[in-house]
């Protein structure tokens, strides 16, 4: 096989949508039935009980297991950052990757607390995407390659994967992508990101408007829209979400940019994100709109907007609580406690 023939394509990625497994309803029913016999009033653990059933459905097994969580942070640079859409320069992306690798970022502390393995995936940081106000951010081949790279983060033996991103300019890319996918006005989707305000915010909104006017107004294919308006790290997140569905690995999404990346898949097939939780509601104003568009509620609302998977890792703690209660609590019979 030649090297060219081995390159992934968006057509090959589209074919995966025909082979996606559904939930294991038998495993979920078994877990929920056990929850009903635990030493507590019926349904008194609320969302924790629902999460245990959801986890079983998408792991496809009983008993459920949460021994090996992975946190995958994808990093990429954006040509549109040259338009002054961020409060920080593009070189901060590589500097923050080094900070992750040295253990100095917020996500490192949270991963240690939650006993989660952190992996950081760099996507050609020295070669940013093109400025999408002038042309497509990526070629379709580059987009497919980034998606395939993201798929590799979902390895055998992982019990759940938390997804996040790092990339100066990616809140602009996410805003343009959400605007192109879901309509409305550019201002509906454009937020402060790293902290822009005033004239800089107006400039950011105008950049998003120009980008979607150029690429998104009449494009019906969400994957093509991803290539034109997205970034390498956003495409990688979409690939990881898709691979996780194929491999029966539940997913926890982080904030705005991460959720927008996943929503590209939703735009292709309703229900394709059923194996995903959204870890938290970001203070980025577009995040709630995206959640409404894809029919998701966040696990937490902590006024966070950092990115780098921090909100997803915080939600991992809630999922751990659900699993531990399900596996560790005694039933009424086991404890010798009267059940009404």
Image (cartoon, grey):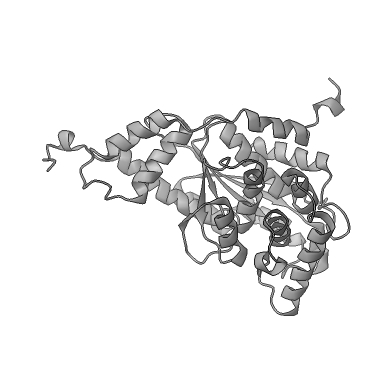
Identify the residue shown where x is 82% and y is 48%. 138
Write down the quadrant of residue 21 in the picture. top right
- Residue 186 to residue 248: above or below: below
The N terminus: image quadrant? top right
Left/right placement of residue 220 relative to residue 303 reads right
- Residue 45 to residue 90: above or below: above
Write down the quadrant of residue 284 in the picture. bottom right
- Residue 97 to residue 190: above or below: above
Q: Is residue 109 something that shows in the picture?
A: no
Residue 297 pos. (x, y %): 48, 54
Q: Which of these two is toward me, 70 or 105?
A: 70
Q: Is residue 157 something that shows in the picture?
A: yes
Identify the residue shown where x is 64% and y is 29%. 18
Identify the residue shown where x is 41% and y is 51%. 318
Left/right placement of residue 119 relative to residue 252 reads right
The C terminus: image quadrant? top left
User: Farthest right residue?
Assistant: 134
Left/right placement of residue 280 relative to residue 320 reads right
Residue 294 pos. (x, y %): 57, 51
- Residue 5 to residue 296: above or below: above
Q: Which of these two is toward me, 193 or 110?
A: 193
Total number of numbered labels?
0
User: Farthest top residue?
Assistant: 1
């Amino acid at each position: 096989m030649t090297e060219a023939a081995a390159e992934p394509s968006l057509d090959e990625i589209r074919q995966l949508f025909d082979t996606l497994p559904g939930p294991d309803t038998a495993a979920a029913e078994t877990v929920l039935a056990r929850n009903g016999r635990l030493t507590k009033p019926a349904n008194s653990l609320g969302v924790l009980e629902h999460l245990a059933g959801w986890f079983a459905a998408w792991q496809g097994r009983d008993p459920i297991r949460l021994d090996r969580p992975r946190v995958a942070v994808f990093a990429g640079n954006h040509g549109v950052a040259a338009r002054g859409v961020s409060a920080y320069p593009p070189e901060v992306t590589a500097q923050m990757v080094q900070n992750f690798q040295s253990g100095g970022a917020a996500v490192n502390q949270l991963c240690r607390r939650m006993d989660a393995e952190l992996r950081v995936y760099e996507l050609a940081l020295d070669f940013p995407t093109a400025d999408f106000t002038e042309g497509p951010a990526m070629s379709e081949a580059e987009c497919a390659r980034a998606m395939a790279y993201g798929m590799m983060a979902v390895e055998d033996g992982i019990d759940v994967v938390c997804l996040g991103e790092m990339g100066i300019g990616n809140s602009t890319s996410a805003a343009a992508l959400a605007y192109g996918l879901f309509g409305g006005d550019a201002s509906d989707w454009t937020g402060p990101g790293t902290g822009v305000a005033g004239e800089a915010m107006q400039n950011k909104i105008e950049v998003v408007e120009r980008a979607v006017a150029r690429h998104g107004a009449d494009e019906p294919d969400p994957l093509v829209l991803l290539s034109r308006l997205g970034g390498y790290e956003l495409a990688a997140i979409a690939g990881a979400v898709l691979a996780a569905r194929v491999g029966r690995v539940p997913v926890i999404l982080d904030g705005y940019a991460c959720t927008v990346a996943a929503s590209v898949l939703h735009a292709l097939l309703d229900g394709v994100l059923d194996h995903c939780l959204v870890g938290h509601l970001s203070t980025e104003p577009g995040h709630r709109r995206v959640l409404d568009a894809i029919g998701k509620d966040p696990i937490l609302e902590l006024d966070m907007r950092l990115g780098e998977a921090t909100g997803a890792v915080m939600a991992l703690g809630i999922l751990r609580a659900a699993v531990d209660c399900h596996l560790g609590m005694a039933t009424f019979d086991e404890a010798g406690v009267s059940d009404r």
